[in-house]
Amino acid sequence: DTAVSQTPKYLVTQMGNDKSIKCEQNLGHDTMYWYKQDSKKFLKIMFSYNNKELIINETVPNRFSPKSPDKAHLNLHINSLELGDSAVYFCASSQGGLQETQYFGPGTRLLVL
Amino acid sequence: AQSVSQHNHHVILSEAASLELGCNYSYGGTVNLFWYVQYPGQHLQLLLKYFSGDPLVKGIKGFEAEFIKSKFSFNLRKPSVQWSDTAEYFCAVIPASGGSYIPTFGRGTSLIVHP
């Protein structure tokens, strides 16, 4: 059973397009995250949701909008994609809050042309 | 804002060699510390963590790490590496006080172990 899953695994698109990445966790965790891993492999947190409530928004452009329909899902929608958005996006979840162990998804490799 | 430095970006070892990967962080308060590992083609997964207590923590697959508060360090060690330890290793810090529980990751260390 996959604990944290993301779709799609790869996403290639043109500048200016709008795209979404979906994340689901079946661990029963309360908190979910989105991270961006840049070309230098730095993992930077973008958003965190706890029980569908936004608790972290780390100076991410407004073009990025997370949506959590329920506590098992945290989707990431990106408007007007730019070249600099090319990266690997990781979803993660944890039980009990931000300080706990995080369980990561496989990542979505986004390439904007 | 806190930061995490992993000074070794690429490490190449032969099997049975000893391993030490450095991790230093900058944050003045209490922290929770983590090492995550990403094996080729797999998810990031927890290797070990330190919250409090004994500063020498043991993780999976024979790994251990020592928290030295005075040096703001949490170095990862393994006495004898195996080919299967080839992976990316990420150190992470989360403040445990101050109200800003923002996780910060290092840029990772790529370990290649030759058989």
Image (cartoon, rainbow, N blue to C red):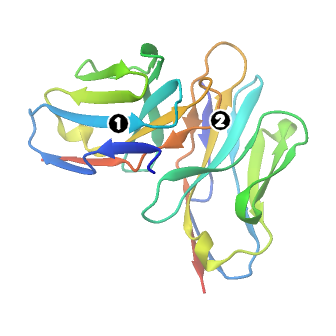
Q: Where is residue A106 drawn, in percent x and y?
A: 40, 50
Q: As shown in the figure, which amino acid type bears the numbered disc 2?
A: Val
Q: Is residue A37 above or below residue A50?
A: below
Say which residue label 1 marks: A23
Residue B67: which quarter of the image? top right
Q: Chain of mark 1?
A: A
Q: How many marks?
A: 2
Query: Distance between the Cα atoms at labels 1 and 2?
Result: 24 Å
Residue B102: which quarter of the image? top right
Relative to B86, A39 lies left or right? left
Circles 1 and 2: CB atoms closer than 8 Å = no
Q: Residues within 10 Å of mark 2 (few under 14, many from 20)?
A: many
Which quadrant of the rendered structure holds the N terminus of chain B?
A: top right
Q: Is residue B4 above or below residue A100?
A: below
Q: Where is residue A64 drawn, in percent x and y?
A: 27, 24
Q: Where is residue A102 drawn, in percent x and y?
A: 57, 38
Which residue occupies 43% across, 21% down?
A58
Tag of residue B93: 2
Which quadrant of the rendered structure holds the C terminus of chain B?
A: bottom right
Of the two numbered discs 1 and 2 in the rendering, the one whose residue sits closer to the viewer:
1
Secondary structure under the numbered disc 2 in the rendered image: strand
Which residue occupies 77% across, 38% down?
B72
Nearest the viewer among A94 and B102 is: A94
Q: Residues within 10 Å of mark 1 (few under 14, many from 20)?
A: many
Q: Where is residue B107 drawn, in percent x and y?
A: 52, 48
